[in-house]
Amino acid sequence: MTVAQQGSGAGAGTVAPALEVRDLSLKIGGAQILENISFTVPTGQIVGVIGPNGAGKTTLFNLVSGVLRPTAGTVLLDGRDVTGRSVTQRAVAGLGRTFQTSSVFPALSVEENVRLAAQVAEGRAISLLTFPRRGDRASDRARHLLREVGLGDRMGFRAGDLPHGDKRKLEIAMLLATDPSVVLLDEPMAGVASGDVAGLTEVIRSLHTDHGCTVLMVEHHMEVLLGLVERVAVLHFGHLLALDSPDAVMADPTVQSAYLGETV
């Protein structure tokens, strides 16, 4: 197996992939953090990213989402170059992201967190001072999404009081309120209790099956990742070592050699 098996960008008469990175590199000082990373994520696929700590996984997400700007290379969403666009502009273009650490508003209720995200998606100003009226679109959407992710009975709870698995579900509901077409999930199982893993896995699966999102996810919980993704990208010291089906990647001798003594 080689990285070349991943496929190239869209050609004449073909549909552009939902996400494509071309020769993406980041150099900070004298350190090469990522070098010439190229891959595509076809529309509707779930692709996993694995690698040991320091491999460049979160850095890759930061470059794709606009938190960092690359030293070289290009990021495309649906065939459109967004390399020079801000985080907000990429979000408007359809890119959503969660982070390793929880990013909810802890003092607000579960419903208010999602309502605010829905208001932003509608182009409205965020307002905590106006009590939502019956029939308010943002509030209706928030309640619908919270029921979808299994938090229908926790809408009035303070977000900061939720167990970690429910906070992850809340983050996904907030993400869905912005109507993303491409979603980046950065270690969604981190800190989640074992009893909550199955439910959260199904919520992640629903991003693909029910909402048609294209998903790129970093996850160290290999059983979860391999049960969700269609392809796996392996990062190693800032390079893309492999990109193929889960079975092919896990059986590849190059990957096994690179991770001898490591947990991928």
Image (cartoon, grey):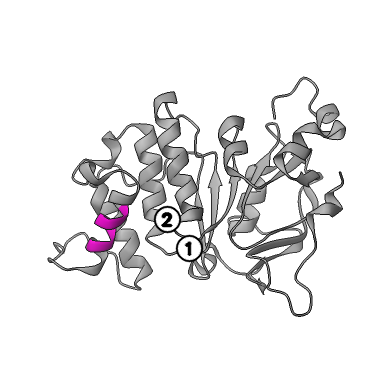
Question: Can you see residue 32?
Answer: no
Where does the image place residue 35, in percent across and percent down from the top left?
Answer: 81, 50
Name the mark on residue 135: none
Asked if the stretch drawn in magenta spans residue 161, the answer is no
CB atoms at circles 1 and 2 under 8 Å apart?
Answer: yes
Q: Quadrant of the N terminus?
A: top right
Q: Quadrant of the C terminus?
A: top right
Element type where label 1 sits in the image: loop
Q: Quadrant location of residue 58?
A: top right
Question: Where 124 falls versus 189 (above or below)?
Answer: below
Question: Can you see residue 173?
Answer: yes
Element type where label 2 sits in the image: helix
Kind of residue indicated by mark 2: Leu
Question: Where 172 falls versus 51 (above or below)?
Answer: below
Where does the image place residue 130, in percent across and percent down from the top left?
Answer: 15, 64
| Residue under the point 52% across and 59% down | 213
Q: Quadrant location of residue 103?
A: top left
| Residue under the point 38% across and 33% down | 164
| Residue under the point 25% across and 43% down | 107
Mark 2 lies on residue: 175
Question: Where 80 falls versus 230 (above or below)?
Answer: below
Near-viewer residue (130 or 144): 144
Q: Residue furthest bottom?
A: 13
Residue density around tag 1, few if under 14, some if 14–19, many if 20 or more, within 10 Å: many
Name the mark on residue 180: 1
- Mark 2 or mark 1, which is nearer the start of the sequence? 2
| Residue under the point 80% across and 32% down | 251
Q: Is residue 247 left or right of residue 254?
A: left
Q: Which residues are magenta?
A: 140-145
Q: Quadrant location of residue 117?
A: bottom left
